[in-house]
Amino acid sequence: MVSKFSCSDIIERPVSSDIMAKAHQKSLEMGTLRNSVTKGSGNLTGFVGEGLVYEYLLDNGNMIEWSNTYDYDLIMNGDILIDVKSKKTGFQPKLHYECSIADQNTKQACDIYFFTRVRGDMTSGWLLGWLPKKEYFDKATFIEKGEVDKTNGWKCKTDCWNVAINELRSVNELVQL
């Protein structure tokens, strides 16, 4: 049974110099992806988010491989494929904030979507939670490009699927898989 998600399930982590160095290198190697909503400016945020998840899972006894592909970012315990989705922020996330997946990324061959928020100054970030891919899309609300999300007033930059943070599973539930 999945327990009720709360603020205590969100984990704040500092961005280590090791994560920052790896994220910066990966960002340079990647360049700008075709169809990038942020035209490549979100690469560093994305890689820092991946690094935060990588370190946390490793610190909690999981075997983790950081192996960026189009379909997934991390491989946990040899066979769980995790795609990390990150957003840049200036403040601590609230439970009603949305976790988004661009419609163009719905075909990724991953098992789990894991969500993070990273401070704009790259000093820390939050591990928000995760959902199995099928469960994410069962819960998600579709929002068209240009539409304003009624839950938060955000104007959508591309077609996407949203789930509120409070609908996610706890990070610690993933650690125990």
Image: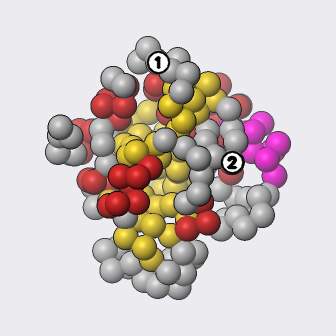
Residue at 50% from the left image edge and 21% from the top image edge: 77
Residue 157 inside the magenta-drawn segment: no
Who is closer to the viewer here, 133 or 10? Answer: 133
Picture layout, residue 21 above or below residue 47: above
Image coords of residue 63 (percent x, y) = 52, 17
Split into 4 quadrants, where in the image is the C terminus?
top left
Q: In screen coordinates, is 106 left or right of 1?
A: right
Picture layout, residue 77 above or below residue 54: above
Q: Are marks 1 and 2 in contact (CB under 8 Å)?
A: no
Sequence-earlier tag: 1 or 2? 1
| Amino acid type, label 1 | Asn
Residue at 69% from the left image edge and 38% from the top image edge: 68
Picture layout, residue 70 above or below residue 138: above
Main secondary structure of the magenta stretch: helix
> Which numbered tag is attached to residue 126?
none
Image coords of residue 62 (percent x, y) = 47, 18
Answer yes or no: is residue 73 visible: yes
> Which numbered tag is attached to residue 62?
1
Q: In screen coordinates, is 148 left or right of 18?
A: left
Image coords of residue 30 (percent x, y) = 79, 47
Give, as a single range, the part of the protein colored magenta. Answer: 23-31
Residue under label 2 = 70
Residue at 53% from the left image edge and 55% from the top image edge: 88
